[in-house]
Structure formats: C-alpha cells, structure tokens
Image: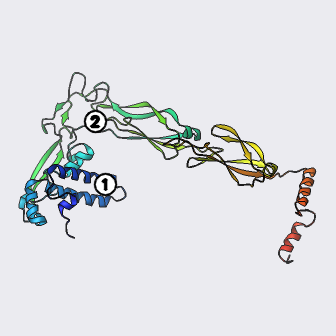
Amino acid sequence: MSKRDFYEVLGVPKTATEDELKKAYRKLARKYHPDLNPDNKEEAERNIKEVNEAYEVLSDSQKRTQYDQFGHDAFQAGQSGAGGYNPFGGGAGGFSDIFDMFFGQSGFGGSGGQRNGPEKGADLRFDMEISFEQAAFGVETEVQIPRTEECTTCHGSGAAAGTHPETCPQCKGSGQTQVIQNTPFGRMVNVRACERCHGEGKIIHTPCRDCKGQGRVRRNRKIKVKIPAGVDTGSRLRVAHEGEAGLRGGPQGDLYVYIFVKQHKLFSREGNDVLCEVPVSFVQAALGDEIDVPTLDGKVKMRVPEGTQSGTVLRLKDKGIPYLRGNGRGDQNVRIKVVTPHKLSEKQKQLLQDFARASGENINPEEKGFFKKMKDALGGTI
C-alpha cells in the first residue's frame, strides 16, 4: 500500500508556512486522538501516526527540502543514514507535541516521561438517588465526598515548615535522565524517570508531618449540588473543580454526579410526559363524571366523558416534567381503568339484568349452565 502525500495528509498546500503546518497538525491530532474515538481506536491510532509522520518531516526545513525533491524515497531505510526519518525522534513535531496538547507536559508520560510539571487532579464520581418529584422539579442538596486536598500545613509543597524542596542535583529538576545509544538505524534516546527524585524533579529532605511529604491529605468534604428540574436516571452533572487536588500546582479535578430516580407509586415517566392510571366505576364511565386526579402539583379536577372505555387515555396539559433545557413542561396522560364490581346485592343484579334486557342482551344466568354452554360450543361432544 503506497503512502499518501504528506501535504495531502495534513490538508495543506505545498506553500504552507510553519504556522499553517502546526495549526493543521494540532487540529488533526485532536480529531484522531484515541480518547475522542472510543468506537474505533485502532483506526484513530493509524491516522494519528500518519499525521505525526507527515508533520515530523514537513516541520523540519531540511527534511522538507529533501521530501519536496525526492518524495518518500528520500527517507527510505539506507538512503538517509543516521539523518533519515525516525518517527519516534525529536525534531519540531513528533509525539511530544501530542502529549503537550492532551496532557500538558512533554515526553511520553508514565515512568519514562517528565513528571515535574503541574498535573490536574483526578475526576470523581458520585451516584445519587433522588425521588420522582425531586427529578421533576429539581433540588439543592449536600453530598459528602472523600477526596484528596492540598495540605494546608505545607500548602502543597510537601516540605516541613521553614524548609523548601530542593532541585534534584542528578536530573537538574527535569525529572528524567537520558541514555543515548548509537545504532545502525540512527541515534536512539531512551528517556527514564530520574532514580533519585523518582521523576519529581525535586527532593524533600524534611517532609511535612501532616501529609508525609505528599503535599496532599485525605478528607471528607461536604459539597453543595444543585440538581436541575427535568433530570432522569442516567443524567450526569459536572461540578467543576470539586474532584481530587492537582499535583505540583495543577488544578483540581471535577466531580461527576450520576442521577438515579426512585420508582413512584402512582406515576411513571415517558420522556417529559407523566403517566398514571385512575380507576372509575362503570357507572362513571358510562354516564360521565368529574373526578379528582393526582398530579405532581396536587389533585386537579378532570372530566371523564360519557361512554369512556377502559384503557382510554385522557390528557392533562402542562402537568408533566419540566424540560431540562428550555421552557414549558410535558403533559400528564391519565389512563382510565373501569372497575367491575365483584360483590353485588340482589337488587343491583336485578337492575343490571333489567339494563341488559333494555339493551337487547340476554344474560340470564339460569338459562344455560357452564357445561351446557361448553357442550354447545363444541358441537355436543361432551
């Protein structure tokens, strides 16, 4: 498979300036970052490697001149010698730019990269269960979160009062050491965390007694959380800067609150509409009536039309859930359940039989017994 033209990869003309190259590179590096493409990480990694390779060459004036003259052949193994293209080398671009963009520091991170710069604190998650009504109308409450915070004794330095961290004499404060090897393919640089300061770039001779030199302590903190009206199970709220404390002056992480709504005895939810079931007698359904219906706002009067059938859904406008982003509310849908009485007096039975005869129905229970009905239905086989 042939390589694409490097200018085509970055989407720039051959006359592109250094700033235009850098702008195109950073845009594509963000676009193809694996964390932003969780459903197709392998393809994103291939794309970002291709983008990085193109920028590594075009951002170096000498390599760019060679590429403009000879194309990809200028960087084939054996032609360029030690000065040939190394996708993991230094230069004006490379992976260090990607890590600068997404992690705020140079190097490859972990134990092999530079770790002595500011680092954002970790994000926290809190699962909150709220009532149906609280989800509908919102609520402001407090949650207690265990988290790490900056030590107030040493103000995050990790050093005891009256002392200060000192720059590591071995790595000169960089937090890393380099081992350089010359190979047939060029000079290889292996970057490791400094063994003396463990990648911190500083050494603490007298640690703070409260945080033991960590600069952070563990505490339970009460945090106010405002739940907006209209949330539902699965909603996620971000409370900025209420996560773990950052390292070396870095910002705090964020707190993410995940919402779980309790089931209601009367109401269920369909989007922003509320559904409830209301029982009525067959007399009310037949003749019509005005009944009390429970809503999130309290009881309201609703007219049941004459001849309403069981299962009919009637609507109460603007009695549902408020819209999370916008004005207005959903509706409340009331499903009518016609209740058939199961204990009738003789007078009630007689009245119903009279009603059936007046309607042209023949439901005399004495006329046919159960087994006779079954026999007739099956053609007299029993």
Q: Is residue 184 visible?
A: no
Three-letter amino acid code at the position of disc 2? Gly
Q: Residue 148 location in percent, x, y?
A: 36, 34
On screen, 288 above or below 140? below
Q: Which residue is mark 2?
A: 250
Marks 1 and 2 in Cβ contact (< 8 Å): no
Give 209 or 149, whichever is nearer the viewer.
Answer: 149
Residue at 8% from the left image edge and 63% from the top image edge: 69
Q: Which residue is mark 1?
A: 34
Name the image quarter holding the C terminus: bottom right
On screen, 268 above or below 53? above
User: How many marks do you count on the picture?
Assistant: 2
- How busy is the neighbourhood of tag 1: few (under 14 within 10 Å), some, or many (20 plus)? some
Instruction: Give the quadrant of residue 135.
Output: top right
Residue at 13% from the left image edge and 37% from the top image edge: 172
Question: Helix, strand, or loop for circle 1?
Answer: helix
Three-letter amino acid code at the position of disc 1? Pro
On screen, 286 above or below 365? above
Question: Helix, strand, or loop for circle 2?
Answer: loop
Please identify the residue farthest to the top as the structure is shown.
162
Q: Residue 217 location in percent, x, y?
A: 34, 31
Which label belongs to residue 69? none
Q: Residue 348 location in percent, x, y?
A: 90, 51
Residue at 25% from the left image edge and 25% from the top image edge: 160
Q: Is residue 307 visible?
A: yes
Please indicate whether residue 126 sits to the left or right of residue 3 in the image.
Answer: right
Give 32 or 199, whichever is nearer the viewer.
Answer: 32
Structural distance between the alpha carbons of marks 1 and 2: 24 Å
Give 124 or 267, whichever is nearer the viewer.
Answer: 267
